[in-house]
Amino acid sequence: MATATTAIFPWRAAYSVGNPQIDEQHKGLIRMINNLQDAMMEGKGKTALSAILNDLIRYTESHFAFEEGLLQERGYSGLAVHKTEHRELTRQVYELRDKFQSGKLMITMDVMRFLKDWLANHILKCDQAYAKELRF
Ligand SMILES: [Fe+2]
Ligand SMILES: [Fe+2]
């Protein structure tokens, strides 16, 4: 497991949305991205990297469903836009996984940076927007 000093993607206080369950789920997603980087650096094979990407997809989908349920419950005004954003992020990570599995893409530092931005930008922009309105 990546340590805070070597991880490409350390947790930052600015990511917190003020809801402990969601923060834990975001930390779990961050951990998976760091695990993927570790596996890449260790030269792990396609099967191991695919397994991590598949875990990331599964966990992403369950996190998005949980978050959307909570936003709906709380009557968040930006829910429809947020759902669209989640769908696009899901599409991107499936595309990455499929390209990797079909041999069209290698897991490189550029891909790791893409995944970091993929999640961090969403948390900082879209998730922080509901945090601001809902004030957990
Ligand atoms: Fe979100
Ligand atoms: Fe989120």
Image (cartoon, helix red, strand yellow):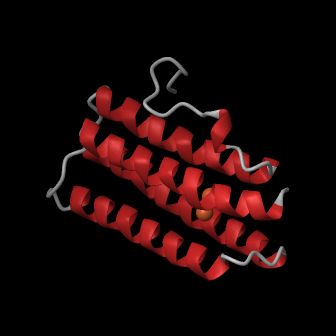
Quarter of the image where one finds residue 67: bottom right
Residue furthest top as drawn: 5
Q: Position of residue 82 (x, y in %)?
A: 59, 73
Left or right, 66 with respect to 109, comes to: right
- Answer whether residue 98 is visible to the viewer in this image: yes
What residue is at 31 percent from the left and 48 percent from the top? 47
Figure quadrant, ligand 2: bottom right
- Answer whether residue 45 is visible to the viewer in this image: no
What residue is at 50 percent from the left and 43 percent from the top? 32
Q: Position of residue 132 (x, y in %)?
A: 75, 58
Residue furthest bottom as drawn: 80
When the figure is inspected, residue 114 is found, relative to residue 86, above or below; the finding is above
**Numbered disc total:** 0
When the figure is inspected, residue 81 is found, relative to residue 124, above or below; the finding is below
What residue is at 77 percent from the left and 64 percent from the top? 133
Left or right, 4 with respect to 133, comes to: left
What residue is at 52 percent from the left and 27 percent from the top? 1
Q: Position of residue 25 (x, y in %)?
A: 67, 50
Q: Position of residue 18 (x, y in %)?
A: 79, 48
Quarter of the image where one finds residue 80: bottom right
**Residue closest to the eye, 71 or 133:** 133
**Residue closest to the eye, 99 or 121:** 121
When the figure is inspected, residue 68 is found, relative to residue 129, above or below; the finding is below
Q: Which quarter of the rendered picture does the C terminus lie within?
A: bottom right
When the figure is inspected, residue 48 is found, relative to residue 62, above or below; the finding is above
Residue furthest left as drawn: 104
